[in-house]
Image (cartoon, grey):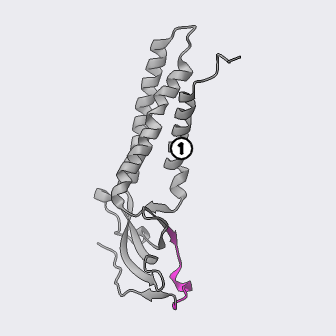
């Protein structure tokens, strides 16, 4: 016997899509995996924004609508208000992530046996708001490609390096004024 109050599969899918989008936009930012090509950042975060924004009115309508009370107008109004609020809040998060990117300032070391593995100095690039103007904007990281699309960057202390495994690049890293 089928249960009448069982939610349709569409709402379960919408809920999981929204939860994945929220995870990616919040806790997923602490995973040090980045796109190799910066041009992929905008489409990725636009997709994540849509994964959060689209399911919200659908799920809100499903929770607010009661077929016995026939409160369609109330459910639609609540869904519209929630969609606008999520659009504004998630939109600011998305724009912030697309504008603030880490940019390589200089390659400090390259691994002898694998030139794709590098130690670089990078700075936070804030677009029109600047970035890279103070020493606190800079960070030294170990950059390793993990797939053709993704790279892993982790902070590293260059004083503890085994100098026999690395080739030093001659660069002057300056703070731009």
Residue 155 position, x and y percent, is 52, 71
Measured along the vertical axis of the image, is residue 16 above or below residue 102? above
User: Where's the C terminus, which quadrant?
Assistant: bottom left
> Within 10 angstroms of label 1, few (less than 14), some, or many (20 or more) residues?
some
Residue 52 position, x and y percent, is 47, 38
Helix, strand or loop under label 1: helix
Residue 79 position, x and y percent, is 46, 24
Quadrant housing residue 124: bottom left
Q: Residue at x 52, y 69 (%)?
A: 154
Measured along the vertical axis of the image, is residue 104 above or below residue 88? below
Q: How many labels does the image show?
A: 1
Q: Which residue is drawn at 51% across and 25% down?
A: 60
Q: Residue at x 51, y 49 (%)?
A: 24
Residue 14 position, x and y percent, is 52, 33
Q: What stretch is highlighted in magenta?
A: 153-164
Task: Decide if residue 59 is on the left or right side of residue 98.
Answer: right
Residue closer to the observer: 157 or 4:
4
Residue 39 magenta-drawn? no
Measured along the vertical axis of the image, is residue 68 above or below residue 38? above
User: Where's the N terminus, which quadrant?
Assistant: top right
Task: Decide if residue 122 is on the left or right side of residue 3.
Answer: left
């Amino acid at each position: 016997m089928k249960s009448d109050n069982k939610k349709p599969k569409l709402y379960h899918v919408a809920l999981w899509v929204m939860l994945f989008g929220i995870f990616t936009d919040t806790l997923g930012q602490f995973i040090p995996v980045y796109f190799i090509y910066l041009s992929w950042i905008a489409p990725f975060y636009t997709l994540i924004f849509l994964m959060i924004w689209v399911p919200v009115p659908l799920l809100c309508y499903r929770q607010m609508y009661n077929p016995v009370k026939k409160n369609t107008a109330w459910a639609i109004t609540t869904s519209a208000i929630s969609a606008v609020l999520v659009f504004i809040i998630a939109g600011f998060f998305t724009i912030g992530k697309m504008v603030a990117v880490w940019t390589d300032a200089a390659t400090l070391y390259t691994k002898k046996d694998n030139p794709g593995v590098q130690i670089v100095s990078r700075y936070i690039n804030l677009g029109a708001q600047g970035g890279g103007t103070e020493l606190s904007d800079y960070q030294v990281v170990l950059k390793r490609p993990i797939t053709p699309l993704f790279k892993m960057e982790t902070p590293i202390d260059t004083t503890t390096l085994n100098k026999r495994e690395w080739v030093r690049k001659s660069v002057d890293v300056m703070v731009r004024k």
